Image (cartoon, rainbow, N blue to C red):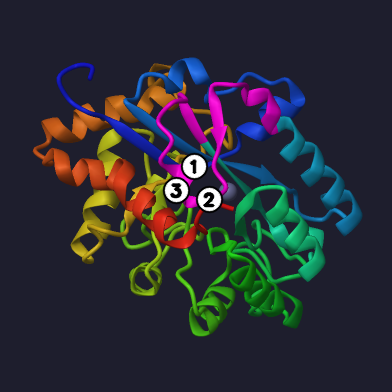
Amino acid sequence: MKRGIWVRLFDLHCDTLGCLADGRKSAVDMRRGGCYDLWTQVFAAWLADGETPEQARGHCEMLLDSAWQLGRQAMRVEDRDSLCDTTHICRALLAVENGGATAADFPYLAYLYRRGVRLITLTWNGDGPWGSGCFGGTDGLTAYGKQAVRDMESLGITVDVSHLNAAGFRDVAAMATRPFIASHSNSYAVHPHPRNLTDAQFCAVRDSGGVVGLNLYGDHLGGWDFSAFQRHLEHFLALNGERTVCIGSDLDGMEIPDVWEGICVFDKLWQHLKGEGYPEPLLDAVFYSNAFAFFSKTLAAKT
Ligand SMILES: [Zn+2]
């Protein structure tokens, strides 16, 4: 144990696979992730809007392939047992962001599951085959999108509503038979940005048994500082969110201040919040154990 306290991180979203694929500098790496006593990371393959399904599938393949570059210090998590591995610096889960871009049907979703994908964000910001993001049209999920939600549930892939528009969110909430999540979304009541969740949306995710990851994007927080983050955290906690709020950094999806030192930012954020009087068990729930509990109940036993 370092520094006399135990800091564990379970981050529900980063865009690091794109950096690995392009050879770009990344905010998330094994050296810096080693600052945590335990670190589990969801690595998302981000697909742009506007590509053909064939192009999107090609990009998806390339991004998922790039996960091998994480190296031997990262252990791939595909089931409940591997979630509990403590012999590697990083437990890595794979996700696809904007899964709708691939126009996936059941066979392709089953293929993604076999590739290790356990979480799919339905849309990005614009319009796609499954539905529309928060900057796209106002219609709900397409018939295709609704079928994809059913298929994901039957395969054991978690549905992620971050980026989705209001009508699409309502459709997911109405039809979901399993918990769904918002992997990287903040509070609209605190800062009215279209990417943020209203209180009713937060409560719908909470009541499904899902989790919500707070991201560090200053445009969504309403400032690039820890006190902005704290306002969103405080608001969601006040909505009976003690077992719902998590971290979903969105690192490598944006530029962050150098002083945050990439993924080590959550160590600093923990110290800040502890200084503000948050008890360690609550911080551990937000930074780690809420997300761990979610995947413990949704991942299959050893495959
Ligand atoms: Zn995103």
Label 3: element kind: helix
Label 1 to label 3, Cα distance in Å?
Answer: 33 Å
In which quadrant will I find the N terminus?
top left
The three-letter code of the residue at mark 2 reads Asp
Does label 3 or label 2 sit earlier along the sequence? 2
Label 2: element kind: loop
As drawn, 230 above or below 108 = above
Query: Mark 1 touching mark 2, by CB under 8 A?
Result: yes
As drawn, 145 above or below 16 = below
CA neighbours of label 2 inside 10 A, class few (<14), some (14 to 19), many (20+): some
Q: Nearer the viewer, mark 1 or mark 3?
A: 1
Residue 90 on the magenta segment: yes
Image mark for residue 82: 1
Q: Which residues are magenta?
A: 67-91
Relative depth, front residue between 208 and 134: 208
CA neighbours of label 1 inside 10 A, class few (<14), some (14 to 19), many (20+): some
What residue did someone put label 2 on? 79
Image mark for residue 220: 3
